[in-house]
Image (cartoon, rainbow, N blue to C red):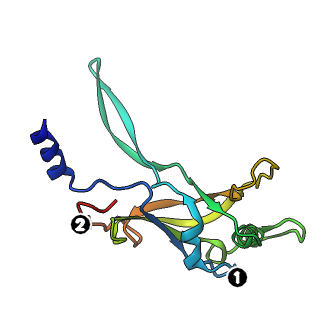
Amino acid sequence: MANKIREIGSVLNATARANKYRLSFAWPQGVTGVSTLSEVDVICKAAVAPQRELGVIELWNQGRKLVIPGDTAFDNTWSVDFYADESHTLRYDMVKWQVACDNFHKNIHSGKPEMIFADLRVEQLDSFGKVTAQYTLHNCFPTVVGEISYSDDSENTPVEFNVTFSYSDWVLGIGETDSYSPMPATKNPTGL
């Protein structure tokens, strides 16, 4: 059994940790956020690496089914949970971003995607905080800025809210296409 554990350890090295990640983005041109974007990563409570699905095409020939790859599909929504500061600064900025897309009260709808779209990035970190994997979501904007719940029995509970973003596609790495090569994690057998 001890040998099997060593074998697993040598193959996996260190496994990726769900709590070692970073979220980053820049405000689009049409949004002037007041939140410090370096702090956005700190108050990000939870995020996910996006999902990609490859469709299939079924071809029938003489009673047999041949399955071949089809088109790539994206879920097109991405959800992130944040802690709120006492001024609700980030939540306010997310609502401002939505207003830049569609100002209900002034009956103005943005027709300029470059003014409201931003690229968001979620990165896997190793135990030393070095980036080992990157996912870049293109053409993002917030579709849902979630509710905040208040309750008298939540005395020592931080306030949280969810933001759901819409996006067009995502790539491994930073650019416009999948140009990613795995980045080795720093060897740290004791790092958690």
Looking at the image, which residue sits at the far top?
63
Task: Please report the residue visible at 78 percent of the width from the left and 47 percent of the height from the top.
Answer: 153
Residue 11 percent coordinates (x, y): 16, 50
Classify mark 2: helix, strand or loop: loop
- Mark 2 vs mark 1: in front: 2
Examine the image and state in which quarter residue 58 appears: top left
How many other residues sit within 10 Å of disc 2, few (<14), some (14-19) or many (≥20)?
Answer: few
Can you say which quadrant of the picture contains the C terminus?
Answer: bottom left
Can you say which quadrant of the picture contains the N terminus?
Answer: top left
Dot 2 corresponds to which residue?
Answer: 184
Position of residue 69 in the picture relative to residue 86 (left or right): left
Mark 2 or mark 1: name the one nearer the start of the chain: 1
Examine the image and state in which quarter residue 60 appears: top left
Residue 123 percent coordinates (x, y): 42, 65
Image disc number at residue 32: 1
Q: Amino acid at mark 1?
A: Thr
The residues tagged by marks 2 and 1 sit, at their Cα atoms, a distance apart of: 37 Å
> Residue 130, relative to residue 17: is it above or below?
below
Residue 115 percent coordinates (x, y): 66, 77
Task: Please report the residue visible at 26 percent of the width from the left and 65 percent of the height from the top.
Answer: 185
Position of residue 27 in the picture relative to residue 105 (left or right): left
> Residue 95, relative to residue 63: is it above or below?
below
